[in-house]
Image (cartoon, rainbow, N blue to C red):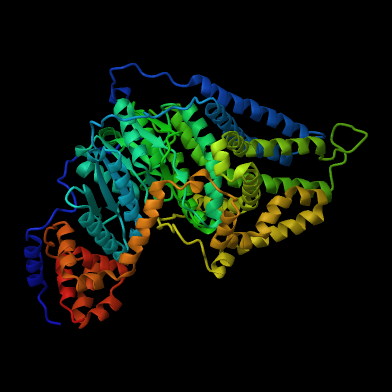
């Protein structure tokens, strides 16, 4: 194929210079976003406010941390009494230490939830403005996406925009879809969906789209790119996730709360899980609705203005974020070095270090998200979160951080270390029983005694301690259940008292069976990270929970084998040990069918028809959710997600012109500089005679190069059909 690439380059540049319709992005309004130093900080660098600093909730913190300390001390005393019936061995001291670590973790969760229970019971949670007369500042609503379904993404954007417009405050908001997609078909589908929606909305759409050629620093880099290029035009930005939905009322009240509080840097809403149908997703949805408000309210009360940020469904003061949240790369290689993976905790820590407030409004309704459809999907996402949270061990000691901020980091780290600690506690417990049963004791110690020294336990205290541990562990769910039973509207919307209680029981039983599987998965993730394994960043599955049975068997075969071996060993050692470990053993033995069942749409829908695991938001589906679902069905019918990117561009010259207009202008390649993927893409296109040949030969990365290069794209478009 004899075509001149230089001639095509000139032609493509001339085509790009032709007059176009409204650009995909507004004029830039840049903000500097300096990289922060984690090792040096002075209070002089903090932002200064004219008004007095609000008092911290010291009484609430004393209740939560003091109560947790007292409860842990009591649990430690009881555990010591259990293992110190006779002379205490090293293994027994090890068991005691591991128990204290694990018990302190659940004790803190208990006291925090208890505080949340009281706050909700007596209406003491922080409130957002009830009515909003006017908004005087502008807010950008930004949705970062990464290889997502455009049918879902743009349905959510349209539904959110319509809801905001209905409040009468629509002029205060612009909308940005910020793409980091690396799949060429997903990228072109996004552009088509964006142009289609903007054409539908008309000249006042205030809807923009930007695709990054290189997804540097992942989501954090995506947001930083927006802030540095357009952040100067907006006092606030409201950050969504690809599965987020927020009502116009919720968004407007968040913006009003930010305007009313000049100290606020980040205000976080409480996203409620909704729109889920697989069994596992419905379990998560019900559990989050049951215990989520209790846990979140307790956290919000004791954190006060030293709160945390969860990365989405929150409003942020743009200038403060730009000035103080530029994330540094950590020294060394991943998993502990490199760019910050769980960026949200760190951004909250840095903006709080600079004096800005970070807090949550847990009672603000209208904030929604979705959840992974199956146990395996959760484990994939959880692996990335595990690495990000353990990476915070490099940041928790940063200069200038608030004590409450360090506690948030510690909580995140411990949420993953708890699994290997629990596993070690089980192993030590088995070793102790094995020692008592099979290993010959030291009959007589150096000091003279008439009777031998046997390692023994106090069974009655052990049973009481087990009951106490279970009560503390389940308390947040029981608090949530009690609050929903008291609230007549929520009780009826959840199917009535009997169905609500039965649903809570189903959730507790299934969660207890799944817990040991998650314990092994998280323990494996922790061990992989400790030996240097990096997770990368994979796109999430949002809809279908079905996974081929062979993949389920492959992922869980060792969990099942371990359950069988542990069960047989425990039974041979002692019947009491087998009974004590039976919940853990049963969960592991059933790992394969439980994982298969978790992604079952039929099982989830069957429970839904019986009115079980039903939430108030599901009983009366919010209008924005119904609207987004209807729009998604319309978008699916358009078929944007199902077509080959290059084939679409070849077929539709008008769209190709609009695509080229959205590409950034690049300087000419310097002589002697070559990009291997571009060279290969060019060679394959030149060697092809028909488009089908080029489509068959080009690899995904080479396709991305073609789509980003006007000259190569023009070359490909000249092939025969």
Query: Is 123 in front, or is 262?
Result: 123
Position of 487 with respect to 370 (left or right) is right
x, y percentage for residue 687?
20, 81
Instruction: Evaluate whether residue 327 shows in this view.
Output: no
Q: What is the tally of numbered marks visible in this picture?
A: 0
Instruction: Evaluate whether residue 233 shows in this view.
Output: yes
The residue located at (40%, 47%) in the rendering is 623
Which quadrant, please, contains the C terminus?
bottom left
Position of 131 with respect to 456 (left or right) is left
The residue located at (77%, 31%) in the rendering is 81
Q: Quadrant of residue 461?
A: top right
Position of 703 with respect to 630 (left or right) is left
The residue located at (20%, 38%) in the rendering is 232
Residue that protrudes farthest toward the right in the picture: 450
Q: Quadrant of residue 320?
A: top left
Is 486 drawn above or below residue 671 in the view shown? above
The residue located at (31%, 17%) in the rendering is 51
Query: Is 276 in front, or is 42?
Result: 276
x, y percentage for residue 653?
16, 70
Which quadrant, please, contains the N terminus?
bottom left
């Amino acid at each position: 194929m004899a075509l001149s690439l230089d001639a095509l380059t000139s032609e493509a540049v001339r085509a790009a210079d032709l007059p176009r319709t409204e650009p995909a992005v507004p004029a830039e309004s840049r903000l500097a976003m300096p990289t922060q130093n984690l090792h040096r900080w002075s209070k002089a660098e903090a932002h200064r406010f004219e008004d007095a600093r609000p008092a911290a909730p010291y009484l609430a913190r004393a209740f939560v941390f003091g109560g947790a300390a007292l409860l842990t001390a009591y649990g430690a005393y009881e555990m010591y009494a259990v293992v110190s019936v006779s002379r205490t061995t090293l293994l027994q001291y090890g068991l005691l230490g591991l128990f204290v670590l694990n018990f302190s973790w659940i004790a803190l969760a208990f006291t925090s939830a208890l505080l949340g229970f009281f706050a909700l019971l007596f209406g003491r949670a922080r409130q957002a403005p009830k009515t909003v007369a006017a908004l005087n500042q502008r807010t950008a609503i930004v949705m970062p996406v990464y290889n997502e379904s455009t049918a879902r993404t743009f349905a959510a954007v349209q539904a959110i925009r319509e809801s905001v417009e209905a409040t009468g405050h629509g002029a205060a908001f612009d909308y940005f879809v910020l793409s980091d997609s690396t799949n060429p078909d997903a990228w072109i589908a996004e552009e088509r969906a964006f142009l289609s929606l903007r054409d539908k909305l008309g000249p006042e759409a205030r809807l923009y789209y930007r695709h990054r050629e290189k997804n540097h620093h992942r989501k954090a880099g995506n947001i930083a790119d927006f802030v540095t290029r357009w952040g100067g035009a907006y006092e606030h930005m409201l950050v969504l996730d690809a599965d987020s939905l927020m009502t116009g009322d919720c968004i407007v009240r968040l913006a009003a709360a930010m305007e009313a509080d000049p100290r606020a840097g980040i205000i976080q809403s409480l996203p409620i899980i909704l729109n889920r149908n697989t069994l596992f997703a419905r379990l998560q949805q019900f559990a989050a609705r049951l215990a989520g408000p209790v846990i979140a309210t307790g956290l919000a009360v004791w954190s006060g203005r030293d709160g945390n940020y969860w990365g989405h469904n929150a409003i942020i003061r743009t200038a403060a974020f730009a000035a103080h949240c530029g994330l540094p790369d950590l020294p060394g290689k991943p998993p502990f070095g490199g760019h910050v993976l769980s960026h949200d905790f760190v951004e909250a820590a840095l903006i709080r270090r600079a004096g800005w407030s970070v807090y949550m409004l847990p009672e603000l309704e209208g904030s929604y998200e979705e959840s992974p459809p199956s146990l395996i999907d959760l484990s994939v996402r959880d692996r990335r979160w595990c690495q990000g949270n353990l990476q915070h061990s490099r940041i928790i000691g940063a200069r200038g951080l608030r004590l409450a901020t360090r506690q948030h980091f510690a909580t995140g780290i411990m949420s993953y270390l708890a699994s290997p600690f629990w596993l070690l506690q089980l192993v030590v417990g088995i070793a102790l029983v094995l020692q008592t049963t099979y290993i010959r004791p030291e009959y007589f110690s150096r000091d003279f005694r008439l009777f031998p020294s046997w390692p023994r336990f106090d069974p009655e205290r052990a049973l009481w301690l087990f009951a106490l541990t279970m009560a503390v562990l389940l308390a947040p769910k029981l608090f949530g259940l009690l609050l929903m039973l008291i609230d007549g509207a929520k009780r009826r919307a959840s199917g009535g008292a009997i169905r609500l209680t039965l649903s809570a029981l189903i959730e507790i039983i299934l969660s207890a069976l799944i817990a040991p599987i998650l314990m092994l998965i998280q323990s494996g993730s922790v061990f992989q990270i400790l030996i240097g394994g990096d997770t990368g960043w994979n796109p999430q599955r949002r809809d279908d929970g079905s996974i081929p049975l062979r993949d389920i068997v492959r992922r869980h075969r060792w969990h099942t084998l371990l359950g069988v071996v542990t069960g047989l060993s425990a039974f041979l050692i002692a019947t009491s040990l087998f009974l004590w470990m039976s919940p853990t053993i049963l969960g592991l033995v059933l790992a394969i069918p439980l994982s298969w069942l978790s992604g079952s749409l039929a099982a989830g829908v069957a429970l839904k028809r019986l009115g079980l695991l039903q939430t108030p938001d599901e009983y009366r589906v919010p209008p924005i959710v119904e609207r987004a679902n209807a729009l998604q069905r319309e978008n699916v019918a358009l078929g944007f997600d199902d077509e080959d990117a290059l084939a679409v561009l070849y077929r539709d010259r008008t769209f190709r012109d609009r695509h080229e207009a959205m590409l950034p202008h690049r300087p000419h390649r310097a002589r002697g500089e070559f990009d291997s993927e571009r060279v290969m893409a060019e060679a394959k296109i030149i060697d092809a005679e028909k488009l089908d040949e080029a489509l068959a030969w080009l690899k995904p990365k080479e396709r991305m190069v073609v789509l980003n290069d006007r000259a190569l794209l023009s070359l490909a478009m000249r092939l025969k059909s």
